[in-house]
Amino acid sequence: MNARQAAWAYLSQVAAGPCAPLADLVGAVGPEEAARAVRGAELPEVLRTRTQARAHLDTAARDLALVERLGGRLLTPDDLDWPQWKLLAFDGTEQRADRESAAPLALWVLGRRKVAELTERAVAVVGTRAASGYGEHVTTQFVDDLAGGGWTVVSGGAYGIDGAAHRAALAAGAPTVAVLACGVDRAYPAGHGRLLREIARDGLVLSEYAPGTAPARYRFLARNRLVAALADAVLVVEAGARSGARNTASWASRLGRPVLAVPGPVTSASSVGCHRMIRDGEAILAARAADVVEAAGPMGVAAESSGPVRRLDGLSSRAAQVYEAFPASGSIGVRELSEGSGLPLKSVQGALPVLEMSGLIDSDETGWFRR
Amino acid sequence: MNARQAAWAYLSQVAAGPCAPLADLVGAVGPEEAARAVRGAELPEVLRTRTQARAHLDTAARDLALVERLGGRLLTPDDLDWPQWKLLAFDGTEQRADRESAAPLALWVLGRRKVAELTERAVAVVGTRAASGYGEHVTTQFVDDLAGGGWTVVSGGAYGIDGAAHRAALAAGAPTVAVLACGVDRAYPAGHGRLLREIARDGLVLSEYAPGTAPARYRFLARNRLVAALADAVLVVEAGARSGARNTASWASRLGRPVLAVPGPVTSASSVGCHRMIRDGEAILAARAADVVEAAGPMGVAAESSGPVRRLDGLSSRAAQVYEAFPASGSIGVRELSEGSGLPLKSVQGALPVLEMSGLIDSDETGWFRR
């Protein structure tokens, strides 16, 4: 255990959830200096109030040892594998609600896979704990198709739709990511202890809460923002009138992620929330996995290529592969691009808008061509 | 049988469906002069071509006698009961597709009720012939609630959703309107002979096709425009990928009527069309009858009050009743208006926008007030 990592662990235990001002302090002075300041309460008022009650909790060594014993690690912005959070930026002027959308300080992770790699193409599949047989069946269908298309399924590890989503991914031989609202050492819900161990074996179980942290209502809400942030789109399979899945969906909207909802029988209480979201324009209706991919695909790739656009820099490997299949001059059709690149038609169709937005290609009535 | 009525019957038999130029001719010279012109082929080219093949069919006396024997009548623009068609206007410059949206020349009607009165507050409930058990169940629920709220259900008399809609209305003791794509003397579909007789007893069976006309594909499409035109909103309960219900829905959109669709299990082929319409923004998701009323209510009433606005002229009795509940000066809340008018809260909420658009009332932070 090095001192810097111990400082991160300490700060994570003290913050106990999203804390944008603390993340800013760490960004400015580094974790060790920030940890010293927190311990000594040498802090601006807002941060002193926020950290005071927990500043004495120096369990870093124990926490790091525990998570290591469980086959995990503490992931921090120091790591190459730290995700490129596309959360709302924090500049100190936001309201409390916006400040809470900050990136996590650090992530406690069980599992060997890399977070950034596993969530490069990811869909959050969430829903009510009180899932119906229909909901579980449909979850399995969607996840099976998404996993087959190379999408990682992210969810919250809860009973109902979440559990069905993780299980379907595992059954399809695809890694899946569970984001918890408690420490990763806790099996919550208790009945999902074995499922969470299976998820960690092939995929990831992660949390921004230090080991030992108990679940709490506000932690579920904060956790939902990470589920949304780690995915290219959020799919709500079933949601009652007051389901937490709608909270995940609203995080997704704020983060610019597409939200989709699966309709169901109007006679089913478990679909009331989905129907309301669709009717009110908060969610796109998803009748099959292709609807999700259509919404998630181009956007997910587009987000990767944001920033200054320079030729193939910043393009996903898929988009670059499609671009390479273009002739140096003259135009080409989607089907030929699929054959030339060796990528499925859907992937080509997803990549074209990205390449177009990047200014690399254009189209006219003869087809697509390099600019 | 008077000569004018015989002329209408003749023209209806010859037109055999929507024929805007003929309707224009009748509007200009009257039915008897128009009939003489058609018989003598003294017509502009477009009309001669259109009427030539059927101009010899002088079955007017027989047709009128037949429909009278069946307890019906020929309804024409001469009648006070002729509906105020809110179809697209025809000025001769439209494309064929738009011309076919013309009002019918005349209507063959079985049943004693008045068309305009019965369709004053009407919802078209349509859907696939291949209805599922879910679809029939949901149709019954929606229609039961709509009928209870005083809405007339209009449909096409077909198997599946149409039949379930008519049956549910009858079961609720509410009159219902069936619009046929063949002569009203024909029981089509054959298995619905008894149902159509029951519909005619308490409600109406109507068609723009003269007695003896057989159903045909293009007649179903033309019939769908009348279903849409007679209703304040169209509700599609179940529709397959190529259901005719989507045709009715697209007529409704062209006529400015709200279109709603009921979602169902994504595993059901009978809901594919509904889901597509909702996803593509062609229909509002309807999870219960209140969703339909919300979409149909104010609009239906507003349409009534179109034309020159003079105080309470042209307002529905409901809107007038709400207006009467206003104090001469000072403002009032929705709940007080509901108590004062004796109308349910929903009705008051539906009437307020109409009264506001009519320039009769306005609102500010204190509530609503007379202008």
Image (cartoon, coloured by chain):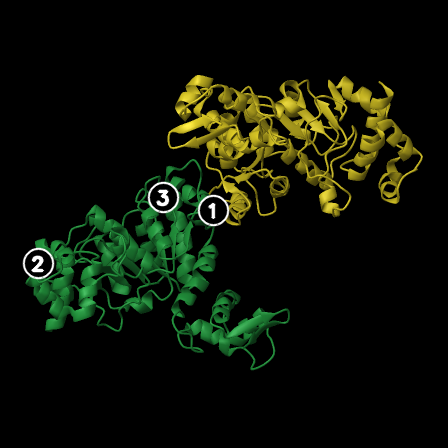
Chain colours: A yellow, B green
Helix, strand or loop at label 2? It is loop
Residue A111 location (% of width, % of height): 68, 20
Circles 1 and 3 in contact, beta carbons < 8 Å: no
Quarter of the view holding residue B43: bottom left
Mark closest to the chain's N terminus, 2 or 3: 2
Helix, strand or loop at label 3? It is loop
Q: Is residue B202 visible?
A: yes
Query: How many marks are shown on the rendered structure?
Result: 3
Quadrant (top left, top right, bottom left, bottom right) of the C terminus of chain B: bottom right
Q: Which residue position is annotated with label 2? A: B55
Confirm whether circles 2 and 3 share one chain: yes
Q: The numbered mark 3 sits on a residue in which chain?
A: B
Residue sitting nearer the eye, B223 or A212: B223
Mark 2 to mark 3: distance in Å?
39 Å
Circles 2 and 3 in contact, beta carbons < 8 Å: no
Q: Is residue B53 above or below residue B175?
A: above
- Checking the image for residue B239, the label placed there is 3
Residue sitting nearer the eye, B195 or A64: A64
Helix, strand or loop at label 1? It is loop
Q: Amino acid at mark 3?
A: Ala
Q: Is residue B157 visible?
A: no
Q: Which residue position is annotated with label 1? A: A266
